[in-house]
Every structure is written in C-alpha cells, then in structure tokens.
Image: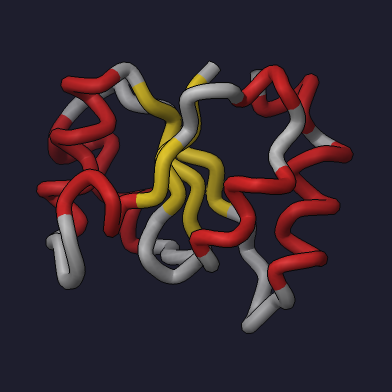
Amino acid sequence: MRLLLDENLSESVLATLPPSFQGSVHVRRLLGDGATDRAVWQAARDGGFTIVTLDSDFEALGPLLGHPPKVVWLGLHNPSKQRVSALISAKADVIA
C-alpha cells in the first residue's frame, strides 16, 4: 500500500515507514507546495494512494467527491515526526 503524506506532515516521516508502505510519497514531491485538498484527493485517487493527514477537512471530502481514496486522519495536535512515524508503524495492519 502506498501512502500520500499531506503537507502538514514532515517529509522525513517517509524514511521511517515500514516496508509495507514502499512507494509512499509526500504531497510536496507530487504536487508542490500549497496544493488544495481537492488536488490532493484527486492525486491520491489517480495514483492509488491512501491519504495520511492531520487535517480534518479530508473527512468531509469523501461524501462530496466519492471514494477512493481512503483517508487516515491521525487526529493529533502538532505531533513530532517521531510520534507520527511510531503511530503509523504501530497501526500498519489497521491502515493496510
């Protein structure tokens, strides 16, 4: 499974992801800075990614734009990259 990390997450998280998430990418590498939520949604849909975000706005896009993609909303407030990495690693089976 490939993850698309939203811009509110550190790009350095990519280097710490478990092997099961090989091919994951950060939104800045795919779309550049300042991509809209709709652009991120469409890129995830087109590329077969699951969006990982801290942004609750993605929750509302599903009913509006339809699925896929899946969204993993971390629901953390200003977490460190270590905390994000640890959470994704600990929940890798659930995410997959």
Residue at the image point whose x is 13% and y is 49% from the top: 38
Which residue is situated farthest in the bottom direction here?
78
Tell me which corner region of the image, top left, top right, bottom left or bottom right, holds residue 95: top right
Q: Quadrant of the C terminus?
A: top right
Q: How far across and how far down the image is residue 37, in percent?
A: 20, 56
In the rendered view, does 15 fall on the left or right side of 41?
A: right
Give how far across and how far down residue 31 sits, in percent.
16, 51
Q: Depth check: 77 or 6 in front?
A: 6
**Where does residue 14 sit, x and y in percent of width and height?**
58, 47
Report the residue at 45% width, 49% height from top. Answer: 5
Q: Horizontally, is 26 left or right of 85 in the view?
A: left
| Quarter-of-image position of residue 18 | top right
Q: Is residue 14 left or right of residue 87?
A: left
User: Total label count?
Assistant: 0
Foreground pick, 18 / 73: 18
Q: Quadrant of the N terminus?
A: top right
Front residue of 10/53: it is 10
47 or 58: which is nearer to us?
A: 47
Which residue is pictured at 17% across the width and 60% down the height? 32
Question: What's the coloring here?
Answer: secondary structure
Above/below status of 9 relative to 26: below
Query: In this rendering, would 33 be left or right of 19?
Result: left
Eyeballing the image, is 28 above or below 33?
Answer: above
> Residue 85, position in %: x, y?
75, 53
Residue drawn at x 42%, y 40% is 25
